[in-house]
Image (cartoon, rainbow, N blue to C red):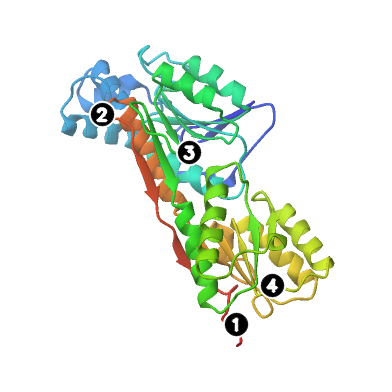
Amino acid sequence: MTFISLARSMVIDCTKTFWYNKFTLPEKEKITLKRITIKDVAKEAGVSITTVSHALSGQGVLKQETRDRIVELARKMQYIPDWNGQNLKASGTGMLGFFTSSISGFYGILIDAMYNECKASGYGMEIFILDDGDLIRLLMGNRVDGAVILHSGLKEEHEQRLRDMEFPVVYLDREIHEKCASSVLFASYESGRLAADYLYSLGHRRILELCGIDYTYDGEMRQKGFEDRMREIGCPMDPDHILKCYFDRQRAYDETSAFIKRGMPLPDAVFAANDDSAFGCIKALQEAGYSVPGDVSVLGCDDIELSQWYSPALTTIRTRIREQGRLSVKELVGLVRKEKTGEIYSIAGELIERSSCRRKDM
């Protein structure tokens, strides 16, 4: 099990190390050598320590104007709550957690957006990369006040355990809305349909599909949306043109290379379930002597940062990763503070046209 703590700098306590330069802050954002305490914030604000604690944790009855003033002052003073709890009431840790099984691809964008929203709401953030069995144990240990979960290994029994605990949770990979649980999801089914319509509009009929992980929400929904729409417009997918690539760049490269070596007819276009798979596919096509988009158009999904810098620049479906990160934390804060009950949010995708697709010569 690995966890990463995020405040204004990133502290790592782990059995395997992860480091993201994205979180290396400019000098003006770094913490001063003098540690700012809750007492310092209270003195500057002209209020009691208890009032500051209530304002930052969302507890107690305060005017919104007072709460906002204290939160903003604490931010400007670069105050960081004591994660060990010496300045916190037993009712809260001042921390929110992101629980996942891996970090790759779009996770950097997602985590950056979540971290910024946590900071704006007066919370710290911890990232846990772990097996499903560790998740419940950590939550029962009161390490965090609430959790954002993107973990394909989470089973129904774990969901029920969290439900019984009435623990505030926001899921990014399953549809659940209850008293203490919300979901913030990409409209992946609709994005799959959008991909089919776009490639069809360019005149492409023989399309290779690079699927994601079929037991995850986004993997299943993108594949279903794409294949449903292709069937509706009279171009049902050939099973031989559906490759399982598991959202993985190397797997997409290997599968595309093997497809080419089998002597299969070259597709007009490729729909990759994520951008990383598209990159692997493009590399395989180029190494085999084919041009993208001259010989084959390639469409990705996610719009991670590398997409605009890749060669060719990748046409993709933007899934608004930052919006998912921001909204998931905002929703979780509302659940933690008992200001609302759970809801399901769906974030629509957007086609971003760059250079990896072109109209087929008729």
Question: SS class of the residue under badge 4?
Answer: loop
Element type where label 1 sits in the image: loop
The residue wearing badge 4 is 267
What is the C-alpha distance between the residues marked 4 and 2?
A: 52 Å
Left/right of residue 276 with respect to residue 172 in the rendered view: right
Quadrant in which the C terminus appears = bottom right
Local SS, label 3: loop
Whether pointer 1 and pointer 2 mark residues with C-beta atoms closer than 8 Å, the reply is no
Give the residue drawn at x 20%, y 21%.
47
Mark 1 vs mark 3: which is more N-terminal? 3
Taking the image as shown, residue 249 lies to the left or right of residue 5, namely right
Camera-side residue of 130 and 200: 200
Q: Total marks drawn?
A: 4
For disc 3, the marked residue is: 174
Q: Residue at x 64, y 61 (%)?
A: 209
Q: Which mark is residue 360?
A: 1
Tell me the quarter of the picture where residue 293 sits.
bottom right
Q: Which class describes the residues within 10 Å of circle 4: few (<14), some (14-19), or many (20+)? A: some
Residue wearing tag 2: 339
* Disc nearer the start of the sequence (1/2): 2
Q: Are marks 4 and 3 in contact (CB under 8 Å)?
A: no
Residue 83 visible at all:
no
Q: Earlier in the sequence, mark 2 or mark 3?
A: 3
Q: What is the secondary structure assignment of the residue under circle 2? A: loop
Write the residue at 60% across / 32% down. 153
Label 1 to label 3, Cα distance in Å? Answer: 37 Å
Q: Residue at x 35, y 36 (%)?
A: 331
Tell me how far mark 4 sits from mark 3, CA to CA: 33 Å
Q: Earlier in the sequence, mark 4 or mark 2?
A: 4
